[in-house]
Image (spheres, rainbow, N blue to C red):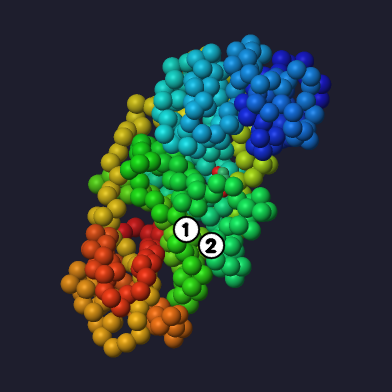
Amino acid sequence: MASKAKAVGVGIIGFGTIGTGVVRVLRDEAKAIEERLGYPVRIVRIADLDTRTDRGVKLRKGVLTKDARKLINDPEVDIVVELIGGIEPARTFMLEAIEAGKSVATANKALLSEHGPELARAAERKGVAVGFEASTGGGIPILKVLRESLAGDKNLEVYGIVNGTANYILTEMSDGRGEFGEVLEAAQRMGLAEADPTYDVDGIDSLHKLVILVALAFGKRIKPKQVHVEGIRNISSIDIAYAKEFGYAIKLLAVARDTPKGVEARVHPTMVPVSHLLSQVGGAFNAVCLRGRALGTSIYYGQGAGMMPTATAVVADILDAARNMRDGKAGAQLVPTYGRPLKTLRSSPVVAMASTSHEHYIRLSVADKPGVLAKISSILGKEAISIATVSQHASPARGAVPLVLRTHRAGEAALKRALAKIGRLGDVRAKPVVIRVEETLGQAD
Ligand code: HSE
């Protein structure tokens, strides 16, 4: 379709995996995109410090530059896509682009979780758009669902699997392909995990995404440092085997509930009942569950990472920004960044982890001799922690056996005190492993 309408110009800062995907989607779907918009989208400039590597996509001469500011200030660039990641210089580039009257789109969850409101404020002042669909859930359009499709409902709970790398590792471990370290190394060799896996396996990436989900789901601003985070490094295949025996799968979950005391938000490995759909989410896939007062529970599943899925989310933001610019009223974004005027996005306390309560799985490595279980149950009893089940398998390792306890719902603070005492018993041979069990996901308390 040869169009006479003037193209919307796009500049991309960061020509890595996702940047390359965006170029490919804009190229491969150019006709469909033009049909939808009524005008074409043209890549005007791409900025990256590495202008030599062949990314396998053809660019017009002069498109590639090392100079991000040249891109931002190019009058032909209407929309700036930030794909370099990290806080700086990404934040400064985005603020400069907004100041120059350009809409921005990004996949940067670290930046959005820390500085999203700052970017939204700047964009609101300038009447431009900030798109960050690709930051959370990769190709799953969960943010648009929260911002627009569920705008009529009151969201009570948002939870799910939002890190593909961690989910891939847990799935491989569950399929018997080794312990955490071996599976991680294999994933790194195959390019499925980053050389520095910290953000993915220690829960930080999930945390950033949870903060973004909370803002859109509840209209509440929480800070990443307020949220309790645990990763998956301490999970062993023996825990996965016990979980299976009890009817659970172990998943790294990000969970948030809107409560009268504040937002309950946490990221940690969780035993999910095999009857829950989340237990079936395997490999690098993501799934986000929402519970709304009117809708009840809805689940969004798909590829949470990767070049092409993530690129589709960025391109959708580009289309939204183009429509706002061309078709919206000057100076007014049709749908605000957080689906609400920024002044109504209020800071909220986060419920202290110590004051939450859960059912727990506790694995101890203990000497197999009389009186050990009695000492442990006495400590738990003194903290008013009720034991639901006890299981000991005869598999001695240097004289120690695994003793697995499941508790009824118990306060975190009491459990912490009890574990400290249990850990000091001479017959307890290793640091206790504790995994929270979620029986009530998606159900009102
Ligand atoms: N590193 C993320 C993951 C993908 O493993 O899910 C980007 O958000």
Can the viewer see residue 8 in this picture? Answer: no
Q: Which residue is drawn at 68% across and 24% down?
A: 46
Q: Where is residue 197 in the image (x, y as percent from the top left)?
A: 54, 49
Bin the neighbour count of mark 2 within 10 Å (Cα to Cα): few under 14, some 14-19, many 20 and up. Answer: many
Q: Is residue 70 above or below residue 414?
A: above
Q: Is residue 343 above or below residue 181?
A: above
* Closer to viewer: mark 2 or mark 1: 2
Residue 180: give its label.
Answer: 2
Q: Which residue is drawn at 69% across and 37% down?
A: 21
Q: Which quarter of the picture shows residue 410?
A: bottom left
Name the quadrant of the C terminus.
Answer: bottom left
Q: Is residue 252 above or below residue 52?
A: below
Asked whether disc 2 touches disc 1, contact meaning CB atoms under 8 Å apart, the reply is yes
- Residue lying farthest to the bottom in this orientation: 370
Query: What kind of residue is marked 2?
Result: Phe
Counting every numbered tag in the picture gives: 2
Q: Position of residue 323 (x, y in %)?
A: 60, 23
Q: Which residue is drawn at 67% across and 31% down?
A: 15
Front residue of 410 and 191: 191
Q: How far apart are marks 2 and 1 (CA)?
A: 8 Å
Q: Position of residue 12 (x, y in %)?
A: 64, 26
Q: Is mark 1 on a helix, strand or loop?
A: loop
User: Does residue 401 appear to the left or right of 377 in the view shown?
Assistant: right
- Disc nearer the start of the sequence (2/1): 2
Residue 158: give its label.
Answer: none
Which residue is under mark 1? 232
Bin the neighbour count of mark 1 within 10 Å (Cα to Cα): few under 14, some 14-19, many 20 and up. Answer: many
